[in-house]
Structure formats: C-alpha cells, structure tokens
Amino acid sequence: MRSNCIINMEIALLTDVGLKRSNNQDYVNRYTNRAGIDLIVLADGMGGHRAGHIASEMTATDLGIAWVDTQLSTLNDVREWMVHVIDQENKKIHELGKTEEYKGMGTTLEAVVIIDNQMIFAHVGDSRIGLIRNGEYTRLTNDHSLVGALVRAGQLTEEEAQRHPQKNIVTQSIGQADPVEPDIALKTLEAGDFIIVNSDGLTNMVSVEDIRDIVLSEVALENKVETLIRFANNAGGLDNITVALLHITEEAH
C-alpha cells in the first residue's frame, strides 16, 4: 500500500578521521535506484593496516552498485534484497579476510531506505540508527556487541557500558565466518522527524542529550553534522566519526 502522505527528505553526510587515528576506516554514501529511491549506507571497518578501510568501503560500494541497478519500490522487495545482498557481501568479505593482506577484516553496516513515509533499515554491528521526534531521541538499533548484550541482560547500565574495557568487541559483523543475521526493521515516519545514522565514534564521545540538542538547533542540516563531528573531536576524537542525518519534511501541496 502506498500512502497518500507525500514527504520530502533532506540528507547530509559527513565523515572525519578524528584526532587519534591515522586513517579513516568509516565509509558513508547515498545511492539512488532506477525508481528514484535512495539507499543510505554507513559502515565502520575493522581489521589491521588497511583492511578495515577496504572492508567498509567495499561493503558500502558493493551494496550501492547493486542498488542503483534495481527498480525496487516496495518494502517487501527491499527487505528481500537486503537479506540477499548482505548475505553475499558477508561471504565475500570473509573470503577476502582469509588472505594475509586483509586478515581479520570486517565491518559494521547500516543500510536505510525510505519509501513514502516508511523507513526500512538493516543493521549489523555497533553503529547506530536513531530517531529524533518531538524533541526526544530514540535508538532504533541494538548494538551487536558484548556490552550491548550485557546491557540488554540487565548486567550493565548504559553508563557502565560506555566505560567498559571491552566495549569495542562486536558479536556480529560483515565478514564473519557464520551466516550474518542482520536486524531488519520498519519505522513509520512523520514530518519533522530526524533520522541519525552514525558510527560509534560519535556516540562514544557525545551524549544523546547533546546529539539531540545539536540536531534540533536552528541551523542548516550540513551545519548540524559538522557540529556533531566537532563535538566528538572536542571530546577527544578517539575514533573515526561518521554521521548521516536525514530530515523528513512534508511537501507543500
């Protein structure tokens, strides 16, 4: 069913190496298919030397290349497509990761598609997707990480998880030996919503309250993502920082 609600979407993407890393292993991009529908992909690579950089860029680009060739325009078709391409990409990155040059390579993945007023997204790893609506931030993803599992089990608080020495250990990533099981979910959007997709280099450094306040500030979308990254760097910039910010607006009739 296609809704009558006609919405527009503004998108701003930005990535930054941060202050402590020598190279940027994050990657973000947007791709448009033949039906005019956008796919936003964010990936945070891991692995020694250049392996993480290759894993994130290759995963995002492979999905993008596959997407632009489709005419998918229904949520069901997009869901099936996501399951298939993510499975294929996991196998591909895993095979590459067996070679000496790319040993242990892997990446997180966030893939977002909006059709009319419905968002469908796929999530693997510990990057995040959040919704800011009516002045409140709601996280839409659960971290596939050791500490994320402990938080959900009630054994750690969110605050303790932030300081945990093993907070970087992910329990799922693209490139793992086992079949990957992405979380795929739907969210109905409303005019005025902001969707924020980010690598952990943002949320490990900047509080949810600060993120919300920056996103709701009265400046252009590009300025908001620049400010988010500046806050992360001011807090230490310990990791690469990547943000995709989407603003849902109603079309004037």
Image (cartoon, rainbow, N blue to C red):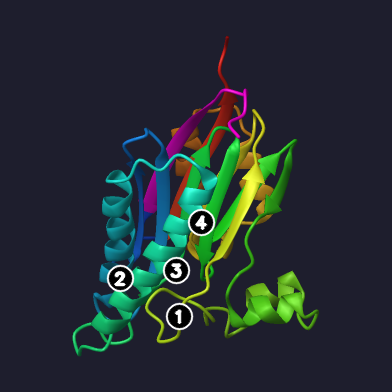
Quarter of the figure with the N terminus: top right
Confirm or deny contact between disc 1 and disc 2 (CB under 8 A).
no
- On the image, the x and y values in percent for residue 133 come to 71, 39
- The foreground one among 238 and 26 is 26
In space, the residues marked 4 and 2 are separated at their CA atoms by: 24 Å
Residue ID for mark 2: 55
In space, the residues marked 3 and 2 are separated at their CA atoms by: 9 Å
At x 65%, y 75%, the residue is 148
Query: Is 6 colored magenta in this rendering?
Result: yes
Frontmost of labels 3 and 4 is 3
Q: Under tag 3, what secondary structure?
A: loop
At x 26%, y 52%, the residue is 65
Residue ID for mark 3: 108
In space, the residues marked 3 and 4 are separated at their CA atoms by: 20 Å
Amino acid type of disc 2?
Ala
- Residue 107 badge: none
Query: Is 178 colored magenta in this rendering?
Result: no
- Bounds of the magenta span? 1-15
Residue ID for mark 1: 179
In space, the residues marked 1 and 4 are separated at their CA atoms by: 34 Å
Mark before the other along the chain sequence, 1 or 4: 1
Frontmost of labels 1 and 2 is 1
Mark before the other along the chain sequence, 3 or 2: 2
- On the image, the x and y values in percent for residue 175 come to 37, 78
Confirm or deny contact between disc 4 and disc 2 (CB under 8 A).
no
Q: Is residue 218 visible?
A: yes
